[in-house]
Structures are given as structure tokens and as C-alpha cells.
Amino acid sequence: MPYDVIIIGAGVAGLYASLNLPKNLKVLILCKDQPWECNTFYAQGGIAVAKDKKDIPLHINDTLKAGAGMCDEKIVKLLSQESLEVLEDLIAKEIPFDRDKEGNLLFTKEAAHSTSRIIHAGGDCTGRVIHSHLISQISHTLWKNATVTELLIDNNHCYGVSVLTKRGNYNLYAKNIILASGGIGALFEYHTNAYTISSELHGMILENGLELQDMEMLQFHPTVFVKTPYARKMLLSEALRGEGAYIIDFWGKRFLFDYDDKGELASRDKVARSIYDYKLQLLQKYPANSQESEVYLDLSAFSKDYFQTRFPNIARNLNAFGFDLPKDKIPISPAFHYCMGGIKSDERGKVLHMDNLYAIGECACTGVHGANRLASNSLLEALVFARRATLDILGKESSLNKREFPLHTQTLHKEQDENLKTILRNLMWNKVGIIRKKSDLNEALGGIEVMLQSGVGRLLKLRLLTAKNIVESALKRSHSVGAHYMQ
């Protein structure tokens, strides 16, 4: 049976969109694995919101400044102005944000914010708390273990999706489709994303002749514990630095001030690039993986009790690796974290040149982040544009255009694909990472094109199409700006 709306993704964007759609509509939410395997669930810092109407101009200015002149100012204004309405709605939905003894919301500060305006929940478990509460309130159908393999598009209309489940492969039809599939983390060797975040939907956009925008603008989080056996590396929230942690070398030098007078609180791209550059210098002097070649996060500014209460998730995870916190220094490295670019969409979340296809959250590019996302604006963007997309759907007459598509017969996985994924991740990290050279980008492009011609499975092909677009976008922008740094 056809649906009114199909939502691809069960992170904060997809869940909040579903909660803004009435119960009488037939809505289906699809997620690739378990619903908690999404970036929202692992988000630590919080949600940036304008504290009040007086703070809106400051929030706008901070966002524009972080975006290095590439933000769409009209979209940024919408984001900040509507943050107050979204916050009011989240409070009405009884999200248990952290508060002081008098019941006032607690605000923390992160890099490049001019004031403390980031709300959080569960200490450093904001994403997990929000996700758990939103999913407990949904009334629509959710399918787990459902991999979207094709968008059923003809001309400017999306008729539905092909989806692979444990029961088989199906074509599902709907009046409106919302893409909320997240970013591109699986393309990189070191990343902080859920393992389901693979950029396949971006590839489907490209194969249908639609646009991705600003895909060269990739944010690498400065403080990540990468010495783990897992694909997703351990994020160490920027709120740590906002509340007093600092970055040092083996001898205790706070070297970031050699790069920027704001030190640890410079914008993310500057901090990540500075750490990366400094580590390269250390590796020229000392053996790899020696203590002297590492950069560390120093948590000694915190008392043990405060650290355990304010950052329980980080404390628990690092304790499991044998660290005595906050006494021990934590070796860190930058890692891929967030894609500022994405599926080109407008102020309603509608994909350009499409009449019933929407993209919201990290998979989309509305122009709000520009060349560098302001810390904790990501959850806010997902919430604001989920709401805007659903308002647009509810405000128009939607009819089901009847059209049958054949089930696709392409092989999704081939035997060599896993090895090629490893090669792709290594190539993207080393050649398309924090500091870029034209020669490296051309080498990466050549490697990707070879893989595309080697008869890979469909899902890897989609990743490769996205990776190719990232590299081509980086080559087109020859000058450095924001997170895109050309050497």
C-alpha cells in the first residue's frame, strides 16, 4: 500500500519530522540497522540555541563568522530565529535538559561561540537522551534493518524507494519522500560517525542527475581518541575545552597559541589543522606511537566528582581503556566528524528541482554551515529543517502519482568490495583530509575512478560516486577557505 510520507533515517531529523506529521497520515520510517545506530545517538555536546531574542543577532554573527563567508545569511537567520520555537517544543515534549538547582536551563560554551548558549542533557549524553525521548513518542511505523538501495525518480518526481529487508527486496511508493540519512563518515579511515553512515544516498542523488553542494567542506573534530579497534573512534566533546580542558604536547606546552591567539577555543578547522600540523612535526623528530610524538588532552582543570557528573559517557568509555580520570592525559588526534555540504536543498528542505523529495539534517546542504559548521549547530539544523519540511508537506495538496518500477537486479555486494572499502578509507584520509595538495587530490581521483571501473557492487559504487564528487569539488576550489585547506 502506498504511503503519505516515507522517511529514510531514524536520527533526530527523521524522528522529529515524524513527530510533526499527524497520526492519521500513513508514514514509514526506514533505518539501515537499529534506530540508535545514527550520529544523533553519539552526539555529546548539545544543541546551540539563541538564549533569547537578544541573542539571535549574536548567534547569527557567530555562525556566519565560522562559515568563513560561505553561509547563506537568509538561512542562518531562519535557523537562529526558529531555534526558540524548537526549544519550546522540545521542552513541551519533556526532553530532560540539564538544569541548575533553581530549574533554569544550563548553557555551556564551545569554540567560536561568543557566549554560553549550548543546552545539553545527561551531561555529555545529549544525543542519546534526545533520541531516546523522541523515539518513545513516535506513533508511525518504523522498519529496522531496511537498506534503501534506489530512489525511484523520473523527471522531477520521486515515486518511492527500493528497500532491502531480511524478508526481501521491495519497491515502496509514497506521496512524499524525506531523506534524513546522515553524512559520509564511512568514507574515512578515522571518523566519529555511526557505522551506518555511508554516503550511499548521496550517490543516488548523483546518479539521478541532482546536485550535491559544498562537498569539499568536511569538518574534522580536533579531539578524538583513535586508539581503539572500532571503526567509529571516540569523540571527546568540545565542551571539555569550553569548560577548561586544554591541549598539550608531551612536555606540557599549550602549542595551539603558536597557531591562533584563541588557543583551544579557536574554530574547529583551525584547531584540527594545528594539531595535525604539530603532530607531523613531532613525527619527524620522534618514532610513531611514542609518547613524545603524541598530542594530549589535559583534563586536570576538573575535579574527579565534577568530571564524572558532567561527562559521564566520556568518563565511562575512557575508564574502560584504563585511564584514571581526570588525572591522566589522553592522546588525541583529529578525525572526520561532519560534512557541511550535502544534497542541495532550499529553505523548506526540498531538494532542488524536485517536487516531492526533501533532504534534512547532515545529508542536506541548505547553506547554513558554509565552509565550517559552528559547534552544536548540527542538531539545531536537523530539528529546524525537519519541522520546515513537514510544514511544507502539510501545506500542499499531495497526490500519489501512480507508476510501477521494476525491482532492480544489480548485485549489492561483491567479494572484493570489503578490501576496496578499506583502500578507499585510507585514500580519503591521507589524500583528501585536513591538509590537501592538488597532487594528492588528483591521485585520489585516479584511484577512485579505477575502483569505479572494476565492477564493484552497487552499494560501494554509490560510495565511490560520493567520494569522487568530494575530490572534484576540492580540486575546483583552488584557494583555502574554512575547513578546505590547500597547501
Image (tube, rainbow, N blue to C red):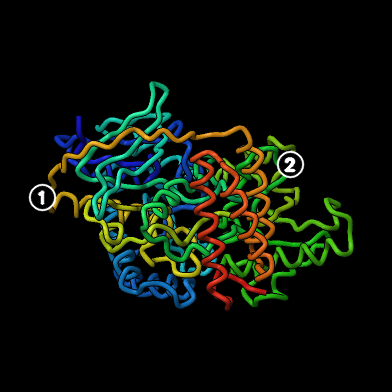
| Tag shown at residue 397 | 1
**Which is more toward the observer, 147 or 411?**
411
Q: Nearer the viewer, mark 2 or mark 1?
A: 1
The residue lying toward the viewer, choosing from 226 and 98, is: 226
**Secondary structure state at the residue bearing disc 2:** loop
Q: Are marks 2 and 1 in contact (CB under 8 Å)?
A: no
Q: Tag 1 or tag 2, which sits nearer the N-term?
A: 2
Residue 219 is drawn in which quadrant?
bottom right
User: Left or right: 281 with respect to 247?
Assistant: right
For the question of whether residue 306 can be seen, the reply is no
Q: Name which residue lies at 71% across and 63% down.
A: 276
Q: Position of residue 174 (x, y in %)?
A: 22, 39
* Relative vertical location of residue 162 with respect to residue 55 in this rendering, above or below: above
Q: Label 1 neighbourhood size at 10 Å, few (<14), some (14-19), many (20+)?
A: few
Identify which residue, 384 or 196, lies in the foreground.
Answer: 196
Residue drawn at (59%, 59%) of the image: 220
Amino acid type assigned to the residue bearing label 1 in the image: Glu
Counting the numbered discs, the total is 2
Q: Residue at x 68, y 74 (%)?
A: 487
